[in-house]
Image (cartoon, grey):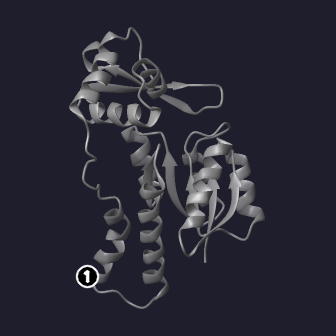
Amino acid sequence: MIEVLVVDDDTRVARVNAAYVAKVPGFRVAGLAHSAAEALHRLEALPRPDLVLLDHHLPDRTGLDVVREMRRRGHQSDVIMVTAARDVATVQAAMRHGALQYLVKPFTFAGLRPRLEAYAALRRTLDGGGEAEQAEVDRIFGALSASAAPGPPRAHSPTTADLVRQTLIRADAPLSAQDVADRTGLSRQTAQRYLKLLERAGRARLTLRYGDAGRPEHRYVWAARV
């Protein structure tokens, strides 16, 4: 059984992520933590978890600080970052500090499950020990990256995309997905999906607004305004 420590400053999100983990055969939630200090304490107090699902935006320190401190203390638990932080510098730093995967919020069970399954396959390969030929080395290094391959894009409506586009164009300030939902009558999930489509197409720009808890709110602005 693979033991997982789930770290997220939002207690609701932590519970959701823990529920996702528990749904994957072979995985068990070892504990929850909502700050860097609590995460490090649980790493000391619990039987050492095999894997840490680690948020970056924590109220006292960053997730990368936690990884650095883990390694300084000799903790070798594997890390998958699960965070809203998407700037390249943070992604690079996570990679350099040994994070095996980097999953950008918001995500669904379908986004997390293949990464956990790939991690389980990787552990089975490594637990076999012995020597590895080049093909086996390639399989080990490719196990987790293969799980991140994007699936086919979901069907979308040009009419809905234009509605979201016009809403951004008319706005005099960056809008969150909830703002767009309120102005268009769409669900928040649908608004978020179309905002991401516009962002990937270079038509909208993502900005982050930080609140008191340290979790950034995703806000979007029409690209021509940036």
The residue sitting at the bottom extreme is 130
Is residue 186 toward the left or the right of residue 35 in the image? left
Query: Which residue is more in the foreground, 24 or 3?
Result: 24
Query: Which residue is more in the foreground, 79 or 173?
Result: 173
Residue 132 sits in which quadrant?
A: bottom left
Query: Which residue is more in the foreground, 120 or 136?
Result: 120
Give percent across and percent down for residue 216.
Answer: 53, 31
Q: Judge whether 75 appears above or below 201 on screen.
A: below
Can the viewer see residue 77? no
Q: Residue at x 32, y 78 (%)?
A: 137
Residue 225 sits in which quadrant?
A: top left
Residue 148 sits in which quadrant?
A: bottom left
Q: Residue at x 35, y 19 (%)?
A: 221
Please give the count of numbered marks on the rendered protein: 1
For disc 1, the marked residue is 135
Q: Residue at x 36, y 75 (%)?
A: 140
Considering the numbered disc 1 on the image, is that residue within a helix, a strand or a loop?
helix
Give percent across and percent down for residue 169.
Answer: 29, 14
User: As shown in the figure, which amino acid type bears the numbered disc 1?
Assistant: Ala
Is residue 155 toward the left or the right of residue 35 in the image? left
Label 1: how many residues lie within 10 Å, few (<14), some (14-19) or many (20+)?
Answer: few
**Quadrant (top left/top right/bottom left/bottom right) for the C terminus:** top left
Give percent across and percent down for residue 64.
Answer: 54, 47
